[in-house]
């Protein structure tokens, strides 16, 4: 163990913060021997723990340490994700959203809550009846693509925006949602990462480890020393009255409910479990999971996440948030998107409607 710690100190001492993720690896670990050791290292991020394997992310030098210790690993950061064709660029997504809002000015509004590290707008589409008016109807939000290499959530949000606008007045479920809910959708929280196919933002910061965390010493709800993308979400949330939300990831197929940072039951534990189960049941491929019973999991029971958006959202704003992992493959062939949309459509619409019950 002393040898392990000595190497880690040598390799990771250059890290400015614990949520830097320029390197990522898929670890084969049938007995979870290395998982338990890596959990003890504050500079490393564990993700997507499943039977016999997990992901580990961290600062430059991580691969050197894995090789030196003969840990079976495969790089997750050299996959040339952008060579997988069919996906729109940030500029193409921007043009698409602009055109949609222009075609549906009474029910859609496009605005930016800030810019990414490299200056790309963080676009939000508001969809509702009398969209230009803030009224007393409940406010709901979806956020996707906070990990840039997890692209399916962004694509689902693009399709959902189009579905809500085009089916208004045709589909009674959609029409009711626009009548009764103020819906906000942010398709990409990390457009720089999506552009380069990287987990972190342009500074290699893991945005889902960058929020204030009530369970650690970073327990003040301040934007100081955080990524600009994180700051944008925090500043936006402070101006709204969201009651229910979800954020979308890839690397597994499961609905994750809070808490992520502590083992204690959530104050609304039965409710968030029921919400998760309802989403999973309406997305059949998720509920059919052989890894997660009924397609749902408590976050902490799966693996600990510190600085996550899900816990922050409820602790400081009473905004219930679930984390929905929508695809085992983070950047699949684009032809798979029809499948993911068809599997998730009804679950997405139903989940939006749940805000009217709160």
Image (tube, rainbow, N blue to C red):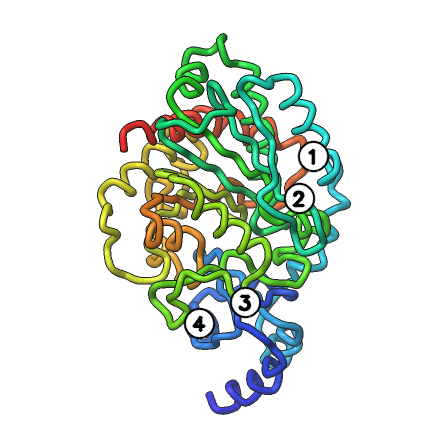
Residue underneath mark 4: 39
Q: Which image quadrant: the C terminus?
A: top left
Which is more N-terminal, label 2 or label 3?
A: 2
Q: Distance between the residues labelled 4 and 3?
A: 24 Å
Query: Where does residue 315 sit, x and y in percent of width and height?
Result: 33, 54
Query: Where does residue 313 sit, x and y in percent of width and height?
Result: 39, 50
Give me the disc on residue 121. Answer: 2
Residue at 56% x, 26% y is 161
Which is more N-terminal, label 1 or label 4?
A: 4
Q: Which of 33 and 224 is in front in this view?
A: 224
Residue at 74% x, 52% y is 80
| Left or right of residue 311: residue 90 | right
Which is more N-terminal, label 2 or label 1?
A: 1
Q: What element carries label 1?
A: helix
Residue at 38% x, 35% y is 280
Residue 78, by quadrant, is: bottom right
- Evaluate if marks 1 and 2 touch, with contact meaning CB atoms under 8 Å apart: yes
Residue underneath mark 1: 94
Query: Where does residue 71 sit, x and y in percent of width and height?
Result: 57, 73
Give me the disc on residue 328. Answer: none
Nearest to the eye among marks 2 and 4: give it: 2
Which is more N-terminal, label 3 or label 4?
A: 4
Q: How far apart are marks 4 and 1 (CA)?
A: 39 Å
Residue at 66% x, 63% y is 203
Residue underneath mark 3: 225
- Evaluate if marks 2 and 4 touch, with contact meaning CB atoms under 8 Å apart: no
Which is more N-terminal, label 1 or label 3?
A: 1
């Amino acid at each position: 163990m002393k040898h392990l710690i000595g190497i880690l100190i040598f390799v990771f001492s250059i890290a400015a913060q614990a949520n830097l993720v320029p390197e990522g690896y898929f670890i084969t670990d049938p007995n979870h021997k290395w998982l338990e050791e890596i959990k003890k290292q504050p500079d490393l991020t564990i993700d997507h723990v499943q039977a016999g394997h997990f992901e580990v992310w961290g600062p430059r030098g991580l691969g050197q340490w894995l090789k030196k210790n003969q840990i079976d690993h495969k790089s997750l950061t050299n996959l040339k994700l952008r060579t997988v064709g069919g996906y729109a660029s940030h500029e193409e997504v921007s043009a698409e959203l602009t055109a949609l809002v222009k075609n549906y000015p009474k029910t859609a509004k496009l605005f930016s809550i800030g810019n990414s590290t490299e200056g790309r707008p963080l676009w939000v589409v508001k969809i509702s009846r009398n969209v230009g008016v803030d009224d007393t109807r409940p406010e709901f939000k979806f956020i996707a693509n906070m990990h840039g290499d997890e692209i399916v959530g962004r694509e689902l949000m693009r399709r959902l925006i189009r579905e809500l606008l085009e089916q208004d007045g045709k589909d009674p479920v959609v029409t009711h949602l626009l009548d009764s809910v103020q819906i906000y959708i942010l398709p990409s929280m990390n457009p720089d990462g999506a552009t380069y196919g990287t987990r972190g933002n342009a500074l290699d910061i893991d945005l889902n480890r960058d929020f204030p965390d009530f369970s650690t010493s970073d327990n003040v709800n301040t934007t100081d020393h955080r990524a600009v993308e994180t700051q944008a979400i925090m500043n936006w949330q402070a101006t709204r009255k969201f009651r229910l939300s979800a954020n979308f990831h890839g690397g597994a197929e499961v609905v994750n409910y809070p808490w992520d940072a502590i083992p204690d039951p959530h104050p609304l534990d039965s409710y968030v479990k029921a919400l998760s189960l309802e989403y999973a049941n309406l997305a059949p491929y998720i509920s059919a999971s052989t890894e997660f019973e009924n397609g749902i999991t408590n976050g902490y029971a799966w693996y600990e996440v510190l600085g996550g958006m899900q816990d922050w959202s409820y602790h400081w704003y009473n905004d219930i948030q679930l984390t929905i992992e929508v695809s085992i493959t983070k950047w699949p062939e684009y032809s798979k998107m029809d499948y993911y949309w068809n599997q998730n459509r009804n679950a997405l619409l139903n989940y939006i409607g749940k805000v009217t019950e709160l």
